[in-house]
Image (cartoon, rainbow, N blue to C red):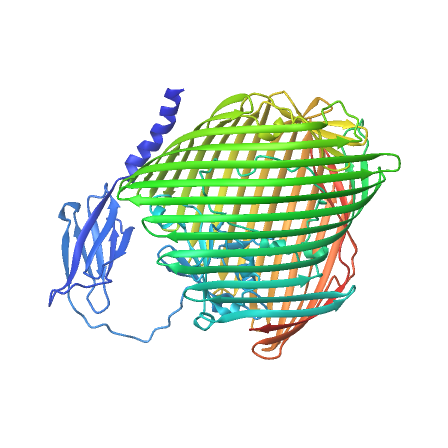
């Protein structure tokens, strides 16, 4: 094994030694006449073929340092500065340091036409000016973000840059939103924003800048001068019909020197979801990548499946959201943050489905569900933070409380009433400190969390009644230390910690006749002691990181020793292109949730019981990725491929007991092979007026599952293509178009059993007959074709008119689903089954709205 590892690692180190060694050319630039330093002069280094190797700018004292590959034996240096004659000369590395004297020369100015690039690049920061990309119909800065080349906004609001989610969201350099950045993107007016800045390979912790590499970007919303130091915001009020509709909201924000805050409140019954603004999209990484946040499955689950439509088409809701987000500068480099969010949601559902288990011995199952749910959520955060080049400190306290109630009447194969109540209270304290002392780095991280979650489910039929009661108390504490030695190119770390989890679960199930334990107390103590040596090497072009975590885990009375070695390398091909690759192997114990030995009824039909197989699972994966970006031409592209080969000592097993399905595990070895290929590109045209984009993906999974104790190998293939076009064609006409085509197929026992195609199109035309008027017409088209020959078409048409009464007041009328469609059919695959859903959608709605910009 040792020889194999050496053979695998030797080529990586050889490549690093070959390409990674660099030298420095140092010097000073002076005025030839008076000997004064020439600052800000551009120094460009090329090889004998004229290819640019690197460039830099002279400091205030005229000095400069520029790196180059040690293999270069002869260098051409180009020096240029306004008011001086440019100089080119050849140097040998042995001549460093050098003194360069520039001769003054008047700059001749001629009449020129300057065409500014669509995107301005400042070192590793890209600047998108709002004036180039904003359109009159944009209601918030989120609408602008969706059209920026290289940036993708998913349906849930998650922002990605060149295929990777952003790791921080700032407003004028402050990250006080705590990851809930939809509060800002869905409320800030484009007229209040000067530019959107993307900081590539962003490391938000200043202590780690230049030490820990990040492939993710940070995004900063830079406000206009007139929007700073004062309150800005938007007030909306709307009323409509079919049925009675209302939508009222107020958003206010003030970004001042010592106090930044956002205040938001909204009530709505037009389909809007408060979770779209209250969800955290970014989280602080307190521990290493091997940390698993949630180890236990939810017990009772009564949320219906959602349709692949814009959720505003399907939500019959009554929703409210209130939030306050604050950050104070209380001392030198110290900030205090306080965020509180309340959201409430009442929903009515009318859904139906038919499940075919693709087995003649198992009858199909149908369900018609009329359901009402109530949910209330309160989230609070308090934090104290400092972020200096030599010290990072953050103390976080989170309090999260949830309450959920569901009542449904079910018909079809079964006829019954179902009611459930679930709630939870979670208190979490995070502490992280990083201290840099010369060439050493010390990190202390700690998390303590307590969760209490009572749950109750009642199922009542004509002659039977079933009740499930659950009470879980979960306490987890993790403490981790990391110590590192830092040099110019090499960083060596030792990471170690203790992770302890006590999970107490009380179960009480009545009315179910099954040969499994159904009542009792389950107390689980999980101890994980881990140590991880880590090293990284970084040069101008190369980055190499190697880690080899080793841990001792004790699950109740079982002992495990696990290892997770990982190798990651990144090569900067040029200023526009980088390549990366990762190899990972993991030897892991059984999942803790499989130790739940008592049966849990999650709803009237589905039961779960764990089955711990006291052996090891193995995960092997290889990932390669390429990214290209050319801000000057507004072209961005990314491509990644991943192959994963896993082994699990147990197989998921479905047992059909009457009308109920018991999901458990069986002790049988199971291999899973998975291939994933994803890519995307975007291109800006006509100075940002038009943006073209496309995303493609392919996934194939081959594994084995078990039904009625009989193994069934199966293969799922999934591929999609999603082109889009957004932009202004003329002053009075703009259009947004997107298409999504998805192909799915599932083979069972090496025979094709099920295939379906989904086509989704969105098209909107906006006419601007005058500076104060806008007329938008558009809609969505859905087409599904099943292997049975069935086809489903759905066309949803919308229209709106907007009139800007004054600079700050706007009136609008919006009509959705003009054809008054009421039903939508679609299909999904499950575990060796296919389910065809019928979903009620909102009928024709008309809403009159007035918006006032504060």
| Side of 57 relative to 512 (left or right) | left
The residue nearer to you, when weighing 71 against 540, is 540
Where is 616 relative to 503, above or below?
above
Which residue lies most toward the left here? 34
Q: Is residue 542 above or below residue 187?
A: above
The answer to whether residue 159 is seen in the rendering is no
Q: Is residue 294 above or below residue 192?
A: above
Q: Does 635 sit left or right of 441 as displayed? A: right
Q: Nearer the viewer, residue 771 or 604?
A: 604
> Which residue appears at 77% of the width and 60% of the height?
843
- Residue 198: where, in percent of width, then height? 44, 56
Quarter assignment of residue 674: top right
Above or below for 585 versus 57 = above
Asked if residue 658 lies left or right of residue 314, the reply is right
How many marks the image carries: the answer is 0
Answer whether residue 758 is visible to the viewer in this image: yes
The percent coordinates of residue 255 (x first, y second) are 46, 66
- Quadrant of residue 220 within the rendered picture: bottom left
Locate residue 518, reporting x and y percent. Answer: 72, 27
Question: Dividing the image into 4 quarters, which one contains the C terminus?
Answer: bottom right
Asked whether 209 or 301 is in front, the reply is 301
């Amino acid at each position: 094994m040792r020889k194999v590892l050496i053979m695998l690692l030797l080529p990586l180190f050889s490549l690093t030694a070959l390409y990674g060694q660099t030298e420095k050319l140092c010097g000073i630039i002076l005025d030839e006449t008076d000997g004064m330093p020439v600052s800000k002069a551009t120094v460009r280094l090329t090889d004998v073929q004229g290819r640019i190797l690197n460039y830099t700018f002279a400091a205030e004292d005229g000095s400069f340092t520029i790196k180059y590959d040690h293999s270069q034996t002869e260098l051409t240096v180009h020096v240029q500065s306004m008011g001086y004659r440019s100089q080119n000369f050849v140097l040998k590395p042995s001549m460093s340091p050098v003194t360069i004297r520039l001769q003054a020369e008047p700059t001749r100015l001629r009449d020129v036409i300057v065409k500014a690039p669509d995107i301005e690049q400042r070192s590793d920061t890209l600047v998108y000016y709002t004036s180039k990309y904003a359109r009159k119909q944009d209601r918030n800065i989120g609408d602008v973000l969706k059209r920026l080349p290289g940036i993708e906004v998913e349906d849930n609001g998650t922002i990605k840059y060149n295929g990777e989610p952003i790791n921080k969201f700032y407003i004028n350099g402050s990250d006080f939103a705590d990851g809930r950045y939809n509060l800002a993107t869905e409320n800030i007016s484009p007229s209040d924003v000067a530019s959107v800045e993307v900081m590539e390979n962003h490391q938000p912790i200043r202590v780690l800048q230049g030490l820990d590499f990040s492939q993710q970007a940070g995004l900063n919303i830079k406000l206009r001068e007139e929007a700073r130091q004062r309150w800005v915001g938007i007030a909306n009020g709307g009323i409509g019909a079919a049925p009675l509709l209302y939508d009222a909201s107020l958003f206010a924000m003030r970004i001042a020197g010592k106090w930044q805050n956002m205040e938001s409140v909204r009530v709505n019954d037009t389909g809007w979801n408060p979770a779209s603004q209250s969800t955290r999209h970014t989280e602080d990484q307190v521990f290493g990548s091997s940390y698993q946040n949630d180890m236990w499955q939810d017990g009772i689950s009564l949320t219906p499946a959602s349709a692949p439509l814009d959720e505003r088409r399907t939500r019959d809701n009554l929703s409210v959201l209130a939030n306050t987000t604050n950050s104070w500068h209380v001392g030198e480099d110290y900030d205090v943050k306080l965020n509180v969010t309340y959201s409430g949601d009442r929903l009515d559902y009318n859904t139906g489905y038919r499940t075919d288990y693709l087995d003649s011995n198992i009858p199909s199952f149908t369900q018609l569900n009329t359901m009402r749910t109530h949910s209330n959520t309160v989230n609070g955060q308090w934090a104290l933070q400092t972020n200096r080049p030599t010290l990072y400190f953050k103390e976080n306290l989170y309090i999260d409380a949830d309450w959920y109630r569901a009542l449904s009447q079910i018909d079809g194969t079964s006829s019954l009433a179902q009611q459930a109540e679930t709630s939870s209270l979670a208190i979490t304290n995070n502490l992280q400190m990083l201290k840099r002392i010369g060439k050493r780095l010390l990190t202390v991280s700690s998390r303590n969390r307590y969760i209490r979650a009572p749950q109750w489910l009642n199922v009542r039929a004509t002659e039977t009644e079933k009740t499930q009661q659950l009470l879980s108390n979960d306490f987890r504490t993790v403490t981790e230390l990391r110590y590192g030695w830092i040099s110019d190119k090499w960083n060596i770390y030792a990471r170690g910690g203790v992770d302890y989890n006590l999970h107490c679960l009380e179960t009480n199930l009545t009315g179910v006749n099954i040969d499994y334990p159904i009542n009792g107390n389950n107390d689980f103590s999980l101890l994980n002691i881990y140590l991880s040596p880590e090293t990284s090497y970084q040069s101008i072009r190369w980055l190499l990181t190697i880690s080899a975590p080793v841990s001792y885990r004790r699950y109740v009375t079982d002992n495990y020793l696990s290892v997770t070695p990982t190798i990651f390398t990144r090569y900067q091909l040029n200023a526009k292109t980088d390549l990366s690759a990762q190899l990972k192997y993991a030897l892991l114990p059984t999942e803790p949730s499989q130790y739940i030995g008592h049966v849990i009824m999650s709803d009237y039909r589905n039961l779960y019981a764990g089955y711990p197989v006291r052996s090891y699972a193995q995960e092997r994966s290889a990932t390669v990725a390429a990214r290209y970006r050319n801000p000057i031409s507004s072209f961005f592209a990314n491509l990644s491929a991943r192959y994963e080969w896993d082994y699990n000592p147990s197989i998921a097993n479905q047992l059909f007991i009457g009308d109920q399905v018991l999901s458990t595990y069986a002790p049988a070895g199971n291999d899973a092979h998975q291939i994933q290929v994803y890519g995307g590109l975007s291109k800006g045209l006509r100075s940002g007026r038009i943006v073209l984009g496309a995303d493609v993906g392919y996934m194939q999974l081959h594994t084995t599952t078990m039904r009625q104790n009989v193994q069934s190998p199966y293969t799922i293939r999934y591929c999609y293509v999603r082109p889009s076009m957004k932009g202004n064609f003329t002053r009075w006409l703009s259009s947004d178009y997107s298409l999504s085509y998805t192909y799915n197929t599932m083979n069972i026992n090496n025979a094709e059993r099920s295939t379906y195609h989904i086509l989704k199109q969105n098209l909107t035309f906006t006419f601007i007959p005058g500076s104060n008027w806008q007329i938008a017409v558009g809609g969505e088209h859905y087409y599904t074709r099943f292997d049975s020959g069935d086809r489903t078409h759905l066309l949803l048409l919308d229209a709106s008119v907007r009139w800007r009464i004054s600079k700050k007041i706007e009136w609008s009328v919006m009509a959705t689903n003009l054809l008054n469609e009421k039903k939508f059919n679609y299909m999904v695959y499950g575990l060796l089954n296919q389910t065809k859903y019928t979903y009620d959608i909102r009928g024709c709605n008309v809403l009159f709205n007035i918006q006032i910009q504060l």
